[in-house]
Image (spheres, rainbow, N blue to C red):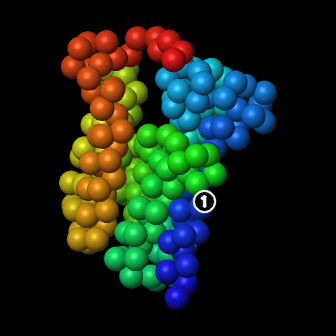
Amino acid sequence: MIGWLLIPAAYLLGSVSCAIIVCRLLGLPDPRGQGSGNPGATNVMRIGGKKAAGITLFGDMLKGFIPVYLANVLDISTSLQAVIGLAAFFGHLYPIFFGFKGGKGVATSIGVLLGWSWWLGLAFVATWLLMYKLKKISSLSALTASSLSPVFAWLIVGDKFVVGATLVMTVVLLFRHKGNIQRLLAGEEGKPVKSE
């Protein structure tokens, strides 16, 4: 019963936009109207600096981590854990509290992966850091780490439900980053983003 209740709870927690809240608390402009227009840590970095971005990143990761980790501790089935993780992830993407217009989901997906397995989450982060060290492009780092995460899930966790949910997050993340992918292919990604 608790497992089923965690699904809507995870979605509602995911719907809390850390970027918007952090910007309001720090007296910064609404991230939806600045830079890329995306309410996520990368855009908060553009308009508010490292401190604001760090708080946003941590908050967005916690949204994915808390419900999945709780489900894990309560020994809820991996099939339900997969749904709970996806609920938190989609809550971030389509938040009920903010007109269903959310961020791209990278940080929240990291939190979900960490909730399933510390090693799985760390594999994502390590891949992101390595790619960023090589190319200095945040979106490329996220896309690379996300694309490899189903493989990591299969190798580290090995559960079909976790692998399946990770694959769903990867496909959605790639779709949400289609503009970034187009700019990468055009050699324009990484340049300053103008306000829309």
Which residue does the image show at 29% across and 40% down from the upper left?
A: 174
Q: Position of residue 187 (x, y in %)?
A: 26, 12
The furthest residue to the bottom: 1
Figure quadrant of residue 104: top left
Q: Say if 51 sits above or below 3 in the image.
A: above
Which residue does the image show at 45% across and 69% down from the upper left?
A: 84
Secondary element under disc 1, as helix, strand or loop, is helix
Q: Say if 73 sits above or below 138 in the image.
A: below
Figure quadrant of residue 141: top left
Which residue does the image show at 31% across and 67% down from the upper left?
A: 162
Q: Can residue 57 be seen here?
A: yes
Q: Can residue 73 be seen here?
A: no
Horizontal side, residue 156 vs residue 61: left or right? left
Q: Position of residue 195 (x, y in %)?
A: 54, 15
Q: Amino acid at mark 1?
A: Leu
Horizontal side, residue 65 vs residue 85: left or right? right
Q: Position of residue 45 (x, y in %)?
A: 58, 25
Q: Say if 181 sits above or below 15 in the image.
A: above
Q: Mark 1: give few (<14), some (14-19) or many (20+) Cα within 10 Å.
A: many
The furthest residue to the front: 99
Nearer-the-camera pick, 34 or 112: 34
Nearer-the-camera pick, 128 or 3: 3
Q: Which residue is mark 1?
A: 13
